[in-house]
Amino acid sequence: MSTTEKMSKTYDPYENVVAVMEEAAEIGKIDKRMFDILKNPQRETKVYLPVEMDDGHVEVFEGYRVQHSNIRGPFKGGIRYHQDCNIEEIKALSVWMSLKCAMVNIPFGGAKGGIKVDVTKLSERELCRLTRRYTYAIEPIIGADTDIPAPDVNTNAQIMAWILDTYSMLKGKPSPGVVTGKPVELGGSKGRTSATGRGVVNAAQLLLEHEGRELSGCKIAVQGFGNVGSHTARIAHFRGACVVALSDISGGIYCKDGLDVNEVIAFTEGGKRLKDFEKSGVKHITNEEILECECEILVPAALENQIHEGNADKLKCRYIVEGANGPTTYEADRILEERGIKVIPDILANSGGVVVSYFEWVQNIQELTWEKEHIKEKLFEIIQAAFKDLLKVAEECSCSYRMAAYIIAIRRLMYAEKIKGIFP
Ligand SMILES: NC(=O)c1ccc[n+]([C@@H]2O[C@H](COP(=O)([O-])OP(=O)(O)OC[C@H]3O[C@@H](n4cnc5c(N)ncnc54)[C@H](O)[C@@H]3O)[C@@H](O)[C@H]2O)c1
C-alpha cells in the first residue's frame, strides 16, 4: 500500500509526520543510514492517574509523556489535556517538537505530554489534583536538564505553576527550570504567553515582505481562539492587518470589513464563546466555513487535521501560516502545492512559543530577568534567520516550504546523530 493510500484511510498524525519526513529525506538527498533513529521516539511513557473527585469517587485517567529526541539538547515540549488525546497523537507532537527546535536552531530536543481528559467536566480543584498526580508520575523523567514541559491545548501558566510546585516539593528545593510558560512571579518569562502568536505574525510578515507585499490591510482568518489564535489575531490587528474571521470550538464569526479583535477578546475573557458574539455586520459561520472564507492569509490555530483532501481544493486564501501543530495533512499539502497556495509550516510558524521557552529556561539557569522588548527583538531575529534558511533550501531543492523546513531540521538532527555516534 502506498503512503498516500495508507493516509487516506484514517488520519494518523504519527504516520503523517513520518510520511513527510520520508519525502523530505528523498528530496533533500539525505543519507538515510541513521534515519530510523529519527522515525522512532527514544521513550514512550504511559501512566494511570487515580484522582479523588470532589464528590469522593475515584477516577483513573490515562497520561502520556513521549520523549522523541534529546540529541541536540534536553527534551522539550508541551502538555495537552484533551478528551481525544492518545499516544499516537502525542508521539507525532513529540516528533514535531524535535523538528521545530532543529528548524529554528535552538539547543533542545523534542517531547510531548498529555492526559486524556475533558477539562470542561473537572472543577479547578480536580484539575489541580490531576496535574499534581501526573507530575508525580512523570517526575523521574523530567527536569531542567532532562525534559522541560510547557503549556499546550487546555493547559496554561496556572497548570505549569502546579507542576513546578509539585516537582519542587518532590525534589526538596525550588526548581523553576523544570517547566516553561509558568507565571512571571514564579520565574516565568515576560512575553511567553503571547510568544507563539507573535511568532506566527512575524512569520506572516516575513512571507508577505518576501512576496513584495505588506501586512497592513492584509485579510486574515484565524481558526482557534485560545492562546495561539487570540494572540495571533490581536498582534496582527495591532500591526494593521484586517482580521476578517475568528473561531473557537463553538463556531466562528466573519466580517468582510474586519473585526475589532480587542472587542472580541474582551467578550471572550469572561468565559463567553464566539457563537454568542453579536454585532451588526458580523455573521456567524462554522469551523468548516472559516477555512473556506475569502482571505489572503489563513491561520489554523486549533488542532491537527483541519485542512485535508476533503477541503484543500475549496480554500480561497493565498497563504497558510500554521499556528497549530499538524493542521494540514500530507495529502492536502499536495493539493495546496498544485494550487500555488504557499504554506509556512508549523515547525517554523508556531516556533515562537518554544523559542521564548528557551529564553525562559536560559533566564532561570542564569538567574536573570530579560525585558520584554529584548525578548521580542531576539524572537524576531531567530524567526527571521530561520525564514532565510527556509528560502535558501526551498530554492536549492526546488521544493515547498514544508519540505524545505523538514530538510533543514532533519539535516541538523542527522548531523548531530552522526558526530555523536551510537552508544555503545
Ligand atoms: N500554546 C503554545 O505555546 C503552542 C505553541 C506551539 C503550537 N501550539 C499549537 O497550537 C494549537 C492551539 O494551541 P493553544 O495553546 O492555543 O490551545 P488552547 O487550548 O489555548 O486553544 C485552542 C483553541 O482551539 C479551539 N478549538 C478546539 N477544538 C476545535 C475545533 N475542533 N475546531 C475549531 N476550534 C477548536 C478552542 O475553542 C480554543 O479556542 C495546538 O495545535 C497546539 O499544539 C501551541
Image: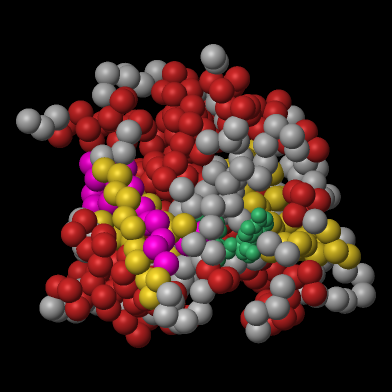
State the predominant SS element of the stretch in magenta: strand
What residue do we see at 38% from left, 37% from top? 409
Is residue 401 in view from this perspective? Answer: yes
Question: Which residue is at a point 23% across and 72% down the rendered structure image?
Answer: 167
Q: In which quarter of the image is residue 268?
A: bottom right
* Residue visible at 54% across and 20% down in the picture: 3
Residue 256 against residue 368 in the figure, above or below: above
Q: Where is residue 335 in the image (x, y as percent from the top left)?
A: 70, 28
Residue lying at the far left of the rendered structure:
424
Mark yes or no: residue 384 visible: no
Is residue 294 found inside the magenta-colored segment of the image?
no
Task: Identify whether 304 is placed above or below 187.
Answer: above
Q: Split into 4 quadrants, where in the image is the N terminus?
A: top right
Seen in the image, is 370 located left or right of residue 24?
left
Colour approach in the figure: secondary structure
Ligand 1 is found in which quarter of the picture? bottom right
Residue at the outermost top position:
1
Between residue 212 and residue 127, name the one nearer to us: 127
The answer to which quarter of the image holds residue 6 is top right
Residue 176 percent across, percent down from the top left: 25, 74
Q: Where is residue 160 in the image (x, y as percent from the top left)?
A: 37, 72
Count of numbered circles on the image: 0
- Would residue 109 be found to the left or right of residue 403 on screen? left
Q: Which residue lies furthest to the front in this view?
A: 57
Measuring 80% from the left and 38% from the top, which residue is drawn there? 314
Q: Where is residue 145 in the image (x, y as percent from the top left)?
A: 19, 59
Please give the range of residues in magenta: 59-82
- Residue 80 part of the magenta segment: yes
Of the 4 image quadrants, the one containing the C terminus is top left
Q: In which quarter of the image is residue 158?
A: bottom left
